[in-house]
Image (spheres, helix red, strand yellow):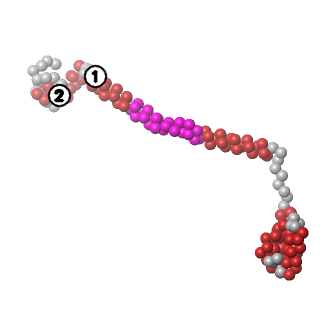
Amino acid sequence: MNCKNAVKALPEYLDLTLGKDEALGVRDHLALCPECREEARLFSSSWEMLDVLETVQPSAYFRAHFWERVREQETRAWGRTGLFSRFPLAPALAGFFVLWLLGVAGGAHLFKLRHRTVTTTEIALNRFLSPYPQNSVEHIFQEGRTPGGNV
Ligand SMILES: [Zn+2]
């Protein structure tokens, strides 16, 4: 047996799970090869250190609690992305709705401006504030009258 095969078989050799013929081959190689003997010593000391550590025993409810937490996380993740994954056009529809709302509001405002009635107070105020002399062409146009017509 060469070094490569001996080192490869070491874990099973030390665990006593190697076949009899192979185990004899590893044993004979270790007797002749100091490098592989050192490798085997390091292996077994590592395993002994692992044996010192206590084996962690999960609580009786660990498995049930674990899957409960997984379901909670999945529910939360679905809640965060659920709206857009269920309705992928939702952002576009929301944008169109906002634009439609702005159009309706703007149209209503323009309609109101165009069809508003000028009060007599506004006419009197315009006459008072106008820089043009009364009954001048500029003043008449400013009031929206036609020249020669009546107010
Ligand atoms: Zn060797």
Crowdedness of circle 1 by 10 Å Cα count: few (<14), some, many (20+)? few
In magenta, the rendered stretch is: 80-102
Can you tell which quarter of the image residue 128 is in?
Answer: top left
Q: Amino acid at mark 1?
A: Arg
Which residue in the protein does label 1 denote? 116
Crowdedness of circle 2 by 10 Å Cα count: few (<14), some, many (20+)? some
Residue 77: x and y in percent read 62, 42
Which residue in the protein does label 2 denote? 142
Residue 125: x and y in percent read 22, 25
Q: Residue at x 84, y 61 (%)?
A: 53
Q: Can you tell me whether the CB of the residue at mark 2 lies under 8 Å from the nearest atom of ligand 1?
A: no
Is residue 48 in view? Answer: no
Q: Is residue 79 magenta?
A: no
Chain-order first, disc 1 or disc 2? 1
Horizontally, residue 87 falls left or right of residue 62, namely left
Q: Residue at x 16, y 31 (%)?
A: 131
Is residue 50 in view? Answer: yes
Q: Residue at x 31, y 25 (%)?
A: 111
- Indicate which disc residue 103 carries: none
Q: Residue at x 87, y 67 (%)?
A: 19
Mark-to-mark CA distance, 1 and 2: 17 Å
Is disc 1 placed on a helix, strand or loop? Answer: loop
Q: Can you tell me whether the CB of the residue at mark 1 lies under 8 Å from the nearest atom of ligand 1?
A: no
Q: Is residue 91 magenta?
A: yes
Point out the frontmost of discs 1 and 2.
1
Is disc 2 placed on a helix, strand or loop? Answer: helix
Horizontally, residue 65 falls left or right of residue 100, namely right
Residue 112: x and y in percent read 31, 24
Q: Amino acid at mark 2?
A: Gln
Q: Is residue 54 above or below residue 34?
A: above
Q: Is residue 59 above or below residue 50?
A: above
